[in-house]
Image (cartoon, rainbow, N blue to C red):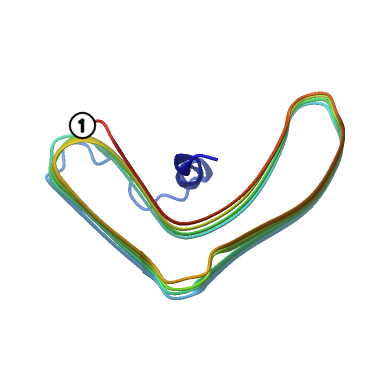
Amino acid sequence: MKMTTVSALALAIGFTAFAGAANAQTIDNNQRNNTNIRAQLNATISDVTGDVSATSAAIANSFTAEGSNLATLNNYQNFWGDSRSGLTATITGVTGDVSATSAAIANSASMNVDFATAINNTQLSGYDPSAALNSTIVTVVGDVSQTSAALSNSASIESEFGRVASTQINMAAVNADMSTTVRNVRGAVTATAAAIGNSLTVTGF
């Protein structure tokens, strides 16, 4: 599993603190979360004509900026809570694809700007993101994809820039667990458990 896959998950789910930063001169994002974040999905799904997707996501701090021509882009995220996500799924008799995801994320940031003079990213995590996925998937015509992902700090920067400074500090245990039974699948089967402390991707320069 690529590092960027986990960080993109927060965007796909739609937990965005800021979007549409076009033509702004300076963006300052300050997110602090000291509470527990919980997500639990128990699903029994059968006899479906089409695709099936089941997602449980606990995300403490999420920031998204997209635009152009910034003088400064500052992101500060501090999570001092406990993020836990659980997915228990029984899925049978599906003619399409099956996707099951459990994700626990402390801090996630995506910054996509045409140009910024300076980009500053600081992410701090002090407690334990934990993701668990337990599933039984039987009789699927399409593909089966399953992911259990726990991530403390993730940042993705795509920009031309003058300077980038990033600090990521993780002082937490990161746990990703998966227990799965898969039978009678015609398509491809993938299963990924990923526990990541710090992830940074910088492109576009």
Residue 77 position in % (x across, y down): 33, 63
Image-based side of 192 in relation to 96, left or right: left
- Residue beneath the point at 43% across and 75% down: 34
Q: How many marks?
A: 1
Q: What residue is pinned by disc 1?
A: 205
Residue 188 position in % (x across, y down): 74, 27
Q: Quadrant of residue 186?
A: top right
Image-based side of 183 in relation to 100, left or right: right
- Residue beneath the point at 50% across and 46% down: 6
Q: Residues within 10 Å of mark 1 (few under 14, many from 20)?
A: few
- Residue beneath the point at 45% across and 46% down: 7
Find numbered disc 1 in the image and state the secondary structure of the residue it sits on.
loop
| Observer-nearest of 174 and 85 | 174
Residue 62 position in % (x across, y down): 41, 54
Question: Where is 184 relative to 38, above or below?
Answer: above
Q: Quadrant of residue 205?
A: top left
Residue 9 position in % (x across, y down): 51, 44
